[in-house]
C-alpha cells in the first residue's frame, strides 16, 4: 500500500451567508508526500476543520486547486467524490461509534456497505482487532470500553477498507496523556507498517511533536508556517508558532520565574541552542575573559535526529566579557537578555 499525495494550490474558501462573508481558508498552498504524516495545528477558528473537509470532498474551494494523487477534486461530480471518500479513512474526536454494535460490528460496518462477503468481513475484522491490540474485545460494546479502546476501534474502522489516506480530526483531545501516547504510537505503527499518509488536525503541539513529519501552522485561514517538525520547533518564525512551541517545550522562564531569577546578581540571557549555535565556544571564551557563567533554566530535546532547545544563563564578571559573549552569539543564533 502506498499513501496518497495531497497538493493544495492557492486554495481559498469563502462562506457567504448573504449578509456576511467569512474567509475560512485564504490562499493555502502545501504538499503532503505519500506516506508522510502532516500535523495541522492552530487555535479554534484557524481553518483546520475546513482544510480536512476539503480533502474528503465535504467542502469545495471557492478558488484554487486541490489534487489527490494528481487528480484535481475541485468540481468533481458527487458520484466520483463518493468513490474518492472510500479511499479515505476518518478518525473522530468523539469516536462516532454505534452504541448498538459491538467493537467488531463497528469495524465491520464499512465493509458491509462496500458489499464484501460475510466470510471475508469476519476475517478482515479479526485482523484489524489484532492490529490495534483489541483481539479479545471484539464482542464488547462501546460502553464497555475505555476511551483509548474506543479510539482504537475507531482507527480499526477507518482502516477497514484499506485506505491510502487517514484524516485524524482532534483524535486525542478527549483522552488522558497516557492514552494519548498509546493512540499516537498506534497511528505511527499504521504509518510505518502500512505506508498510509496521515493528516492530523490538532491544537496540541505535543501531538505534532510526537508523530508528525511536517507541520502546517494555521491562523485566520492562512498557513503562516510550514516545514519539517524539527524546523518549526527549533526555529519558529511566527508569533503563533512560537506560542505553540513554548507550550510543548516549556524551556523558557515565565514571568514569575524570571522575576525570581532577576533577584540575584548578574545578567540573564536566553539562548536558542541548535547544533550550529556556537554556544559552548562563546561560553568558553567568556570564561577565559574573566566571566562566570551558569545555566539557570532551560531544556534540550531531540527531534528527527536533531538536538535543539533553549537555555537561560546567568553571567557575572567584566562587562566587556559579557558583551563579547552576547555579540558572538547574536551572529549565530537567537539570544535575548532578560531585562530587569
Image (tube, rainbow, N blue to C red):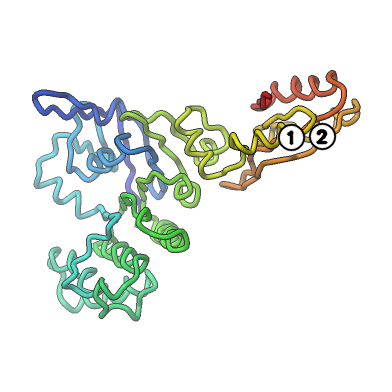
Position of 31 relative to 21 (above/below) = below
Q: Quadrant of the N terminus?
A: bottom left
Q: Which residue is mark 2?
A: 293
Answer with the quarter of the image where residue 19 lies. Answer: top left
Which residue is at 34% across, 54% downward?
171
Q: Which residue is mark 1?
A: 313
1 and 2 marks in contact (CB < 8 Å): yes
Of residue 205 and residue 82, the one placed in the foreground of this image is 205
Which residue is at 36% across, 75% downward?
134
Position of 274 relative to 339 (above/below) = below
Q: Residue 156 in the image: x percent, y percent?
A: 30, 66
User: Which element is circle 1 on?
Assistant: strand
Left-right relation of 10 to 183: left
User: Which element is circle 2 on?
Assistant: strand
Position of 58 relative to 236 (above/below) = below
Label 1 neighbourhood size at 10 Å, few (<14), some (14-19), many (20+)?
Answer: many
Amino acid at each position: 500500500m502506498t499513501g496518497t499525495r495531497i497538493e493544495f494550490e492557492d486554495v481559498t474558501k469563502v462562506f457567504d451567508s448573504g449578509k456576511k462573508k467569512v474567509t475560512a481558508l485564504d490562499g493555502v498552498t502545501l504538499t503532503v508526500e505519500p506516506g508522510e504524516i502532516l500535523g495541522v495545528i492552530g487555535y479554534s477558528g484557524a481553518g483546520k476543520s475546513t482544510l480536512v473537509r476539503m480533502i474528503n470532498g465535504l467542502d469545495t474551494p471557492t478558488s484554487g486547486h486541490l489534487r489527490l494523487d494528481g487528480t484535481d477534486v475541485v468540481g468533481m461530480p458527487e458520484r466520483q467524490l463518493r468513490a474518492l471518500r472510500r479511499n479515505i479513512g476518518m478518525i473522530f474526536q468523539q469516536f462516532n461509534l454505534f452504541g448498538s454494535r459491538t467493537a467488531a460490528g463497528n469495524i465491520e460496518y464499512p465493509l458491509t456497505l462496500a458489499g464484501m462477503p460475510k466470510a471475508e468481513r469476519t476475517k478482515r475484522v479479526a485482523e484489524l482487532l489484532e492490529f490495534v491490540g483489541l483481539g479479545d474485545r471484539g464482542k464488547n460494546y462501546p460502553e464497555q470500553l475505555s476511551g483509548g479502546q474506543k479510539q482504537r476501534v475507531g482507527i480499526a474502522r477507518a482502516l477497514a477498507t484499506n485506505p491510502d489516506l487517514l484524516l485524524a480530526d482532534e483524535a486525542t483531545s478527549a483522552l488522558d496523556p497516557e492514552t494519548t501516547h498509546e493512540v499516537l504510537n498506534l497511528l505511527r505503527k499504521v504509518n510505518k507498517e502500512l505506508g498510509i499518509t496521515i493528516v492530523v488536525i490538532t491544537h496540541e503541539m505535543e501531538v505534532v511533536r510526537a508523530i508528525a513529519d511536517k507541520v502546517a501552522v494555521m491562523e485566520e485561514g492562512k498557513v503562516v508556517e510550514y516545514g519539517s517538525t524539527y524546523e518549526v520547533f527549533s526555529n519558529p518564525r511566527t508569533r503563533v508558532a512560537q506560542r505553540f512551541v513554548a507550550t510543548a517545550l516549556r524551556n523558557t522562564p515565565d514571568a514569575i520565574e524570571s522575576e525570581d531569577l532577576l533577584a540575584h546578581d548578574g545578567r540573564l540571557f536566553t539562548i536558542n541552542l541548535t547544533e550550529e549555535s556556537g554556544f559552548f565556544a562563546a561560553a568558553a571564551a567568556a570564561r577565559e575573559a574573566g566571566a562566570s557563567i551558569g545555566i539557570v533554566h532551560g531544556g534540550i530535546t531531540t527531534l528527527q535526529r536533531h538536538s535543539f532547545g533553549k537555555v537561560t544563563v546567568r553571567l557575572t564578571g567584566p562587562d566587556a566579557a559579557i558583551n563579547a559573549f552576547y555579540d558572538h552569539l547574536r551572529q549565530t543564533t537567537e539570544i535575548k537578555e532578560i531585562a530587569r
